[in-house]
Image (cartoon, rainbow, N blue to C red):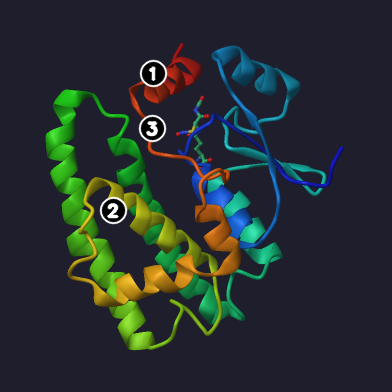
């Protein structure tokens, strides 16, 4: 067995994508086992690999980790992406929890049936532009540093860049009113490990198309 973490999920973003981003930002190589069909999920369940019968699951350091936030907390702590003290950490947690909420809106949109999309799109863009992005723009302004918290890269920066790029897929000029988020995006995208992850051919996943959605539905709702 190699010492690399192994990620168990379908070949798409979903809840695993922030974990891929964190590992990539930390410069940690990882391997993936993709669920292709419902039987693959059943097999993992029957193996006893999934504490709550759910993925994401990440095998690392001799453990089978589940629950997205627990996995992300572990990786962020292990690779020093979680602030320098308790006060930095609680700020990071607050920002990241907001990002998880926004991520959920952005991620789910692609899975909705066509007739629900119009209203959902308006809500998703409204929340992005009027609730979440103004907060992060203000945090950058008030803090006045290159990063959201403290003076070094944290998981909050990594997860914000991920979300900015996702939001731009739905509305390319979504940063128009947010100059500090624009410069943040350029700066964080240029960090070598992240720059590498942004190159074509990396383990970053793309926006799901209809076939991807159908495949995921068959895995979880056969
Ligand atoms: O964050 C977490 O890891 C858990 N609180 C939720 C995990 C979860 O819902 N996993 C789904 C697939 S990923 N997409 O949403 C899952 O395994 N569903 C099957 C099931 O039986 O719940």
Residue drawn at (67%, 60%) of the image: 27
Residue 20 percent location from the top left of the image: 57, 48
Check the image and report above or below for 96 versus 47. below
In x, y percent, where is residue 102? 33, 53
Point out which mark residue 168 bears.
2
Alpha carbon separation for disc pair 1 and 3: 10 Å
Q: Is mark 3 within 8 Å of ligand 1?
A: no
Q: Judge whether 90 appears above or below 12 on screen.
A: below
Foreground residue, 178 or 192? 192
The answer to whether marks 2 and 1 mark residues whose Cβ atoms lie closer than 8 Å is no
Ranked by sequence position, the earlier of labels 1 and 3 is: 3
- Residue 59, how many percent across, how many down? 73, 40
Q: In this view, which residue lies farthest toward the front?
A: 200
Dot 3 and dot 2 residues touching (CB under 8 Å): no
Q: Which mark is residue 208?
A: 3
Q: Residue furthest right?
A: 1
- In the image, 94: left or right of 16? left
Helix, strand or loop under label 2: helix
96 over 91 or under it: above or below? above
Q: CA distance from mark 2 to mark 1?
A: 24 Å
91 sits to left or right of 69: left
Number of marks in picture: 3
* Mark 1 C-beta to ligand 1 under 8 Å: no
For the point 28% across and 53% down, the residue is 168
Which mark sits nearer the N-terminus, 2 or 1?
A: 2
Q: Which residue is mark 1?
A: 214
- Residue depicted at x 34% and y 78%: 139
Where is residue 71? Give x, y as percent.
62, 50
In which quarter of the view is residue 174 placed? bottom left
Q: Tell me the crowding category of disc 1: few under 14, some 14 to 19, or many 20 or more residues within 10 angstroms, Cα based.
A: few
Whether residue 109 sits left or right of residue 86 in the image: it is: left
Q: Is mark 2 within 8 Å of ligand 1?
A: no
């Amino acid at each position: 067995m190699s010492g690399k973490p192994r990620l168990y999920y379908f070949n798409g973003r979903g809840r695993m994508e922030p974990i891929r981003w964190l590992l990539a930002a930390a410069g940690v190589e990882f391997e993936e086992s993709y669920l292709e069909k419902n039987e693959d999920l059943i097999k993992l369940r029957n193996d006893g690999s999934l504490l709550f019968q759910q993925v994401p699951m990440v095998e690392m350091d001799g453990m089978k980790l589940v629950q997205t936030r627990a996995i992300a907390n572990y990786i962020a702590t292990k690779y020093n992406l979680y602030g320098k003290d308790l006060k930095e950490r609680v700020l990071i947690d607050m920002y990241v929890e907001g990002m998880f909420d926004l991520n959920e809106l952005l991620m789910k949109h692609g899975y909705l049936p066509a007739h629900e999309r119009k209203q959902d799109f308006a809500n998703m863009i409204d929340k992005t532009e009027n609730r979440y992005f103004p907060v992060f723009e203000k945090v950058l302004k008030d803090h006045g540093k290159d990063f959201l918290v403290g003076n070094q890269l944290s998981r909050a920066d990594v997860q914000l860049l991920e979300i900015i790029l996702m939001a731009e897929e739905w509305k390319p000029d979504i940063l128009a009113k947010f100059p500090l988020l624009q410069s943040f995006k350029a700066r964080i995208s240029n960090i070598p490990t992240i720059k590498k992850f942004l190159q074509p051919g990396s383990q970053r996943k793309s926006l799901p198309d209809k076939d991807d959605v159908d495949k995921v539905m068959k895995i979880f709702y056969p």
